[in-house]
Image (cartoon, rainbow, N blue to C red):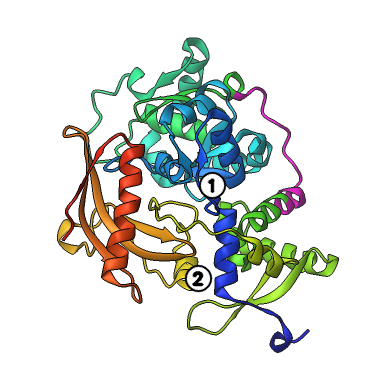
Amino acid sequence: MSAAALPIVPSRAARRLLIEGCALDGAPRKATRASVIQLVRDLGFLQVDSISSVERAHHLILHTRLDGYTPALLTHHTERSRELFEHWTHDASLIRTDWLPWWTARFEHNRARMESDAWMRARLGPQWKKVVREVRKTLEARGPLATRDFPRPASAEKSEGWWNWSPHKAALEFLWRAGEVAVHGRRGFEKIYDLSERVHGPQPEQPARAAVVEWACREAFARLGAATASEVSRFMHAVTIAEANRWCASAVKSGALARVLLERGNSAPKPGFARLEWKRDAAAVKLHKQARLLAPFDPLIRDRARLVGLFGFHYRFEAFVPAAKRVHGYYTMPVLVGDALVGRVDLASDRAAGVLRVARVWAEQGVTAAMARREIRVACARLADQLALELAYSPT
């Protein structure tokens, strides 16, 4: 079939498919242990982030989708039921533990990459193999430990910031990324490590590469609905673009996917792929009209290129931008209403005062200032209630 004859997936349909795949269709569910783990299973994983000026991103993602959510509900599944494990997708994430077998190839790849990585080797020191062995033996003998439980060498340089790792910290991260060590829990936000077999049991057998590609692409389409091969690859960073492209082409031949053109903003439609019933599925999505705030790493918006193409929304996370160069603010959250991003808000939790402070709001193009301010206030009031804070809403 020529490109001109391919069906076009309108951006509105693609937005609806993505909203459903990101569990933002319908009203928020009631937060319970069962609904929390079901939601993470639906999403596949939650990106973890340390910044807590409003609340940590993984908790905000759940606050958006659940009423009455508290962090203890998530901690139950990371530290007690062990239905989630922590590792890397596109970034540090909490991942369904039944997906652990698919990470074995990544563990192997990480080990090979880190052994030849000059940055990691510099932090481990010249006797890096010995350091790694000793750290593993210490965990084996003493049980769960954090970096602070290891002595920092007297010769270690003074802090150079976030990445000033001691050799012990580097060894713990080396072993964690290689799958020998797992995150046993957290003390505040500090990782506590233990041997993987004591946290999750014996490491599963590594699946064949073809099976990994099949799983990764299938799970991506279950949540994206319609996508380019590049977007499928970026979903979990588990497969290359070439592997995703080959799998999609094979799925088209077998009748599992349709080859389509994807409408993306004002540019020419992009070649891509979609579920066979994408039109019916998109029409069946029940959009929720209540305004909801999205964390900077919410699954709906974390792929910034896709965000621009589908929603026309240009978003930059500015926490690491010098204050004088910020356009919107340190921790700005987009506001979703239905299938549209109507504005954004600069806010922060003042826990000492017990309030959620809203500093500034912006309406997106085509949205009236009055409508945006109304919806943003509704969304902020809901989040304040979720965080057990009073809303201090006096934006400029």
139 on left or right of 109: left
Q: Amino acid at mark 1?
A: Thr
User: Label 2: how many residues lie within 10 Å, few (<14), some (14-19) or many (20+)?
Assistant: many
Three-letter residue code for mark 2: Leu
Is residue 179 something one can see in this rendering?
no
In the image, 70 versus 163, the foreground residue is: 70
Q: Is residue 257 visible?
A: yes
Residue shown at 55% from the left, 85% from the top: 268
Q: Nearer the viewer, residue 338 or 225?
A: 338
Q: Where 268 falls versus 176 (above or below)?
A: below
In the rendered image, residue 228, in percent from the top left (x then y), is placed at 61, 69
Percent position (x, y) of residue 37? 57, 34
Question: Of marks 1 and 2, which one's residue comes earlier in the chain?
Answer: 1
Question: Alpha-carbon distance for marks 1 and 2?
Answer: 23 Å
> Which mark is in front, 1 or 2?
2
Horizontal side of 319 relative to 146 (left or right) equals left
How many tags in the picture?
Answer: 2
Q: Position of residue 150 (x, y in %)?
A: 35, 19
Determine which residue is flagged by label 2: 310
The residue beneath circle 1 is 89
Q: Residues within 10 Å of mark 1 (few under 14, many from 20)?
A: some
Instruction: Name the element at disc 2.
Output: helix
Name the mark on residue 270: none
Q: Is residue 207 magenta?
A: yes
> In percent of the image, x 74 and y 53: which residue is there?
214
Whether residues under marks 1 and 2 lie with C-beta atoms below 8 angstroms apart, the answer is no
Helix, strand or loop status at disc 1 = loop
Q: Which residues are magenta?
A: 200-214
Residue 143 is situated, as x and y percent measured from the top left of the image, at 49, 13
Quarter of the figure that contains the C terminus: bottom left
Q: Name the residue rendered at 55%, 43% in the picture.
A: 45
